[in-house]
Image: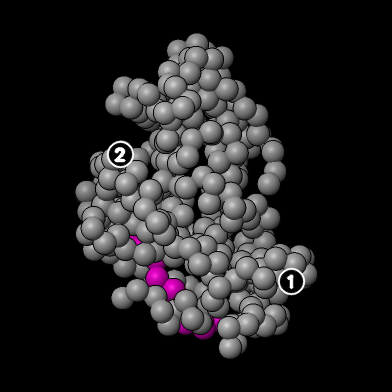
Amino acid sequence: MRTNYRIYPPRQAPFSYHVTQIAIAIIDSGTTNELISAIELYSQSLPSVPLYIVTQDGRFDLVRLQDTYAHLGILVFGGSTYIGEKVNAIASVCSANYFLTVRSDTVMVNFEYDALLSLMGQVGHPVVAGSIIANAYREIVPCRRIPVPITDTIDPDSDFPTMDPNHPDHTLYPPMGLGLYDRALFQRLRGYDEEIHSDYFQLLDFGLRSYLFGYHITLSPDLLVQFANRESIIEDRSERPGFERCYTKNLSIRRVKKKNKVKKPPLHYDRASYNGEVKERFQWLQKIDYAHLVETWPK
């Protein structure tokens, strides 16, 4: 993982490390007023929870911001970057068992702290409990991602979550990277691939890796965010530099008679990830292949 960011640790921690289970990271993605409102909201409603923001150079007077919010940790990137780098940085900096990623241009509608901790404490818990998403009209959007057979691309279907708190839906990846992460498990899976220069393909790559390695990701109505100023929430699935890494890492292994067979993918080959990750690590760790994932996906 890269370290192209600076860290401003909290000047005054309002919590005890031995009881801290969750940290919250606000991704600066809107106006200055929206970020300040988000900081105020989480500081007041969850005063004992460590709070971080992820931003970039030139957005704020950071000294003045920490003068006002001494409990705030700040991660500052040198320029614009992708969701994967931001989440990787949060996982590296925070010391909590779990960390919640939110955006400054969203409103937290539902955050059932105890229920989410209970979910993440179960045997076989998800890598990420992804946030369900609503638009400006408070309408739930089709934020559940479902793997489908490959045509000329990996192009997951989208559907509405069932909103059943007792049986959270599986989703191929957390929509927009928002959700509650198991920090240790996320890092064991090596987080997001920063060589992929696309939010969508970073998310897709991590989600596929999670499932192919025997883990899963869910959506739960215990975690619901609203984009108060957006009528539609659409992800950009266009091919960007490094997207071939997603195809190569996740389509190069076929599971035959309980053994992994390595072969170059039918689409979008990347030599570095094939000779590196696939041959050196993935062929020994992968539990299923993509075809089996599609066949056994929960209905």
Residue at x 28% of width, y 45% of height: 115
As drawn, is 156 to the left or to the right of 76?
left
Q: Can I make out residue 221 in this image?
A: yes
Residue linked to disc 2: 113
Give the residue type at disc 1. Answer: Lys
Q: Is residue 150 magenta?
A: yes
Looking at the image, residue 144 lies above or below residue 153: above
Segment colored magenta:
143-153
Q: Against 91, is 39 above or below?
A: above
User: Helix, strand or loop at disc 2?
Assistant: helix
Could you say which disc has been placed on residue 196 in the image? none
Q: Is residue 148 above or below residue 101?
A: below
Comparing 152 with 293, the one in front is 293
| Colouring mode (rainbow / by chain / secondary structure / one colour) | one colour
Residue count near mark 2 (Cα–Cα under 10 Å), binned few <14, some 14–19, many ≥20:
few
Residue 64 is situated, as x and y percent measured from the top left of the image, at 52, 13
Viewer-side residue, 21 vs 254? 21
Q: Looking at the picture, tell me which residue is in the foreground, 170 or 75.
A: 170
For the point 60% across and 38% down, which residue is it?
92
Where 53 sits versus 229, above or below? above
Q: Calculate the distance from the C-alpha at mark 1 to the C-alpha at mark 2.
A: 41 Å
**x and y percent of residue 130 in the render?**
38, 53
- The residue pinned by badge 1 equals 279
Could you say which quadrant of the image residue 45 lies in?
Answer: top left
| Image quadrant where one finds the C terminus | bottom left
Q: Is residue 154 magenta?
A: no
In the rendering, at what x and y percent does residue 183 appear?
Answer: 51, 45
